[in-house]
Amino acid sequence: MTTISPTINVEDRNRPMSAEERKVILASSLGTVFEWYDFYLYGSLAAIIGNQFFSAFDVTTRNVFALLAFAAGFLVRPFGALFFGRLGDLIGRKATFLITILLMGTTTFLVGLLPSYATIGWIAPVALIVLRMCQGLALGGEYGGAAVYVAEHAPQGRRGFYTSWIQTTATLGLLLSLIVILSVRLQLGEKDFQDWGWRIPFLVSIFLLAISVWIRLQMHESPAFQKMKEEGSLSKAPLSEAFGQWKNLKIVIFALLGLVAGQAVVWYTGQFYALFFLQSILKVDLFTANVLVAWSLIFGTGGFILFGWLSDKIGRKPVILSGCLIAALSFFTLFDLMTRTASPKLAEALEKVTVNVTADPAKCGSVFDPVGIRTFTEPCDIARVAMARSAVKYQLVAGPAGSATKVTFNGKDVPVDPALVKNMASFTAAAVEAGYPKVGDPSIVKLTSVIPSGTQAWTIVGILTILVLYVTMVYGPIAAALVEFFPTRIRYTALSLPYHIGNGWFGGFLPPTSFAMVAATGDIYYGLWYPVVVALATVIIGIFFVPETYKRDIFKG
């Protein structure tokens, strides 16, 4: 096999992609398939995993632990970015992201083999958290390696198009996980899937790993790194050079706040929070919600290539920042339309049913609880949390000092019980009586097959597809932009950190934070302020502080 020469990076933008370049893209992209395949598997199956590995605790506590184990993968991603980014700038791109995909694929497979709490006791949850942290570390090094490797093989003027394929396969990994989960669930039935069938999606990842490793073993080192190695100009201390020198550190900060933070919240809102909103707030059943999202991914995925290509023509900033701005200005409208379409009875109830929580302000605290670990004891707080979990819109009204908490639905009193579970039952019953839909209400969109039918279902697919197109605008060009910011000698290290802080922290914690904002205010749309504010801040910072890079020669430095 012939190594691609650095001379490929000249004005060569009109020639077709070579077979070698296609292999480079495929080898690099399979890691992102793993990334989102695993992410969605764990996120979708968190409740089942909680039952399997935290069964010693009550239902609420086990769900909290399951979500915390999920979050552990996000928390360590920046540390993986630092460790593997440094390694990639010291020993090479190919060797490093071969290590990361082996670690990521192996740990994903081992989750499927891990015995439950009932079998090995406390070792099971500890081992699960360790595996999640190993996955997070590997993910921290995987994306940077893939982006750098593809970009350093791409012809000048086509980096956006070439690296956009990496972004495409991230969504394909999500789509693949949806297909596998739905297929196994339908084949085995719900009981067997809950008992043992949930392991199958994790176990089949071994085939993705085998294919990825086989392809990556055949690849050569990136031409840019090879050139620096031959010249003896490699960085001896990538971490201190990338983050200890202000000229590089300020680029990292501007890249994070002026591009990646906005990209991350638009990404997670369009794909993950939209799914969460359908299931947890609009009460659309799991099968229907997953199928609707899957169809939107099918229709919208080509946008990654389109906007990556467009960024080669007009620049990275106009595409990414336009996506952030359009998304921020239309999120409230689109989610309102989604509510009116998916659950029209709920939309009507939100407008017509008046729910008041009247209490002494001194007895009402903050119910902001993004990780679900707080225990509420005041009746005012218990009532608000219970109604938020039932998707009931409420208003907090200040009562006289020392007065008892009072809850009314259209003026009708509903008793407040000290037990949260009892409140959820009584408030749900009162909400249904007042006009809110109950779970399984015939007005809520419901599918019986993987092919949507009817205006209601296809309208929701259309809304979700628009959200996915926003994702493709901001995410399609981001890899090329990050690669172009930094010199070759510290590129792997420097770009990995802002990407994983942005996507791991700004984006990864968006769904629970947004829902916590909903619970704290009683407004089902209030959580959208989080992505809207971050996206608008990114637009402002990006316009004034982020340079345009699409014409840079990345072989310099």
Image: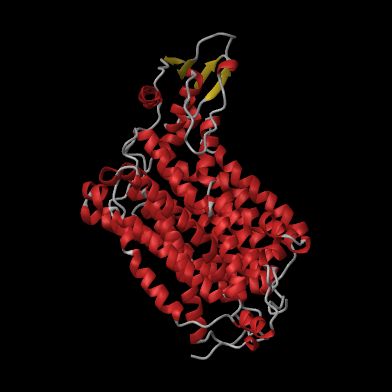
Residue displayed at 50% across by 30% down? 351
At a point 52% along the width and 66% down the height, the residue shown is 142
Q: Position of residue 292 (x, y in %)?
A: 39, 54
Q: 391 or 180, which lies in front?
A: 180
- Tell me if 464 is positioned left or right of 437 in this view: right
Q: Is residue 273 left or right of residue 318?
A: left
* Residue 455 is at least partly visible in this image: no
Its colouring scheme is: secondary structure
**Above or below for 406 versus 91:** above
Name the spot of residue 189 as percent of width and height, x first. 22, 50
Residue 103 x %, y %: 44, 64
> Which image quadrant for residue 162?
bottom right
Residue at x-position 64% and y-position 51% = 535
Q: Which residue occupies 46% across, 17% down?
A: 408
Q: Position of residue 328 (x, y in %)?
A: 62, 49
Q: In the rendered image, which quarter contains the C terminus?
A: bottom right
Q: What is the quadrant of residue 176 in the picture?
A: bottom left
How many circles with numbers are drawn on the protein? Answer: 0
The answer to whether residue 398 shows anywhere in this view is yes
- Position above or below: 80 against 235: above
- Return the residue nearer the eye: 247 or 38: 247
Q: Is residue 378 left or right of residue 203?
A: right
Q: Residue furthest bottom?
A: 2
